[in-house]
Amino acid sequence: MASPIIRRFNRFFVCGIDGTVDHFKGIAKNLEENQRDYDVKFAKSFVRQLCNGGLPSRYLRGPAATGSGLGWAMGEAKQVITSRFNQDAAAYIRSKSDMHDPEQRGYILTGYSRGAAGIIEVATRLISDPACKKLGIQIYAMILFDTVNETNTSLQGVINRGGIPTFSNPESIITGNLQIPTNVANCVHYIRSDETNSRSDTMEKYRGGPINNAKTRYTPLYLKATHGGLGGLPYFKGEGDGNNIPILEPGAAFATNVTMAEDIYASRQVAKNVTNFCATLGIPLGVSV
């Protein structure tokens, strides 16, 4: 793992965008029922665990399988982060107390799947949008779980937009080509290894990295796991260590090269690594499987 950039903060804020649901049960199903389905499926996702770990946070559900909803989540994430910073700044002007100093709050961004693509874009907007750039918000830690290459020009991005490589909603456009921007100090990224054959036809794997290695300590970790396993949702039923049957993902024509035993093992390794990453940076968070 890259040698981290360590700072000490007196408080933190976590913002996360989770992954994509495979499907909804019926096109006519109402939004409330769809949200309940999503909440059940992603109840133990790593992003949700980090956002529900006891620190001030904002958890945002991921987009639909078509990619719709990602623009809203990105805009909301940017808004809550800048609002938090401005609230701290206003309180600091009034009190002059270090407990309100906006520079003493460590920001943590996390995302899974298309939500990870969205969270990278959020960090990019914090230094590219003129109104955000002047605030100088720095991201202390970014934790990414198998980012999907969801850009306007990527094959996956074009597919998700029905052959049209842009959204009509400007908030939905990925502007940064998914490179980790220079306002991110530390980033760990859990990625499917090439041998897995997991979601290889539907989710183009992330191939990027940081814009500047000196400003961002980036550690990519490649694991033999399914896309679900890397997000904290391994294909595993019951207790124990799984079995040696290759996993057939929903909608896939062919099985992956990952067994249930390998998926649960890799998912637990991710959980352990995330917890250690946070501990090293002095962030009181951890996840489990």
Image (cartoon, grey):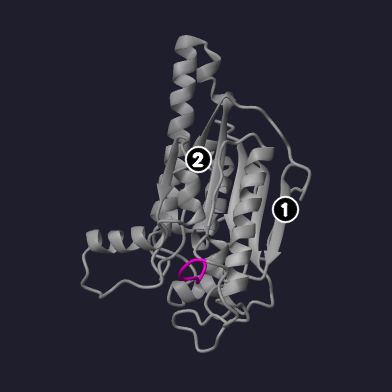
Q: Which residues are magenta?
A: 234-239
Q: For the point 36% across and 73% down, which residue is it?
A: 23
Residue 277 found in image quarter: top right
Residue 31 found in image quarter: bottom left
Residue 80 pos. (x, y %): 42, 38
Q: Can residue 177 be seen in the rendering of this structure?
A: no
Relative vertical location of residue 7 with respect to residue 198 in this rendering, above or below? above
Label 1 sits on what residue type? Thr
Relative vertical location of residue 184 with respect to residue 219 in this rendering, above or below? above
Residue 159 pos. (x, y %): 48, 76
Give the number of the disc on residue 166. Answer: none
Sequence-wise, which precedes: disc 2 or disc 1?
Answer: 2
Q: Residues within 10 Å of mark 2 (few under 14, many from 20)?
A: many
Q: Residues within 10 Å of mark 1 (few under 14, many from 20)?
A: some
Residue that numbered label 2 is attached to: 14
Q: Main secondary structure of the magenta part?
A: loop
Residue 264 pos. (x, y %): 57, 67
Q: For the point 62% across and 57% down, which residue is it?
A: 270
Residue 65 found in image quarter: bottom left
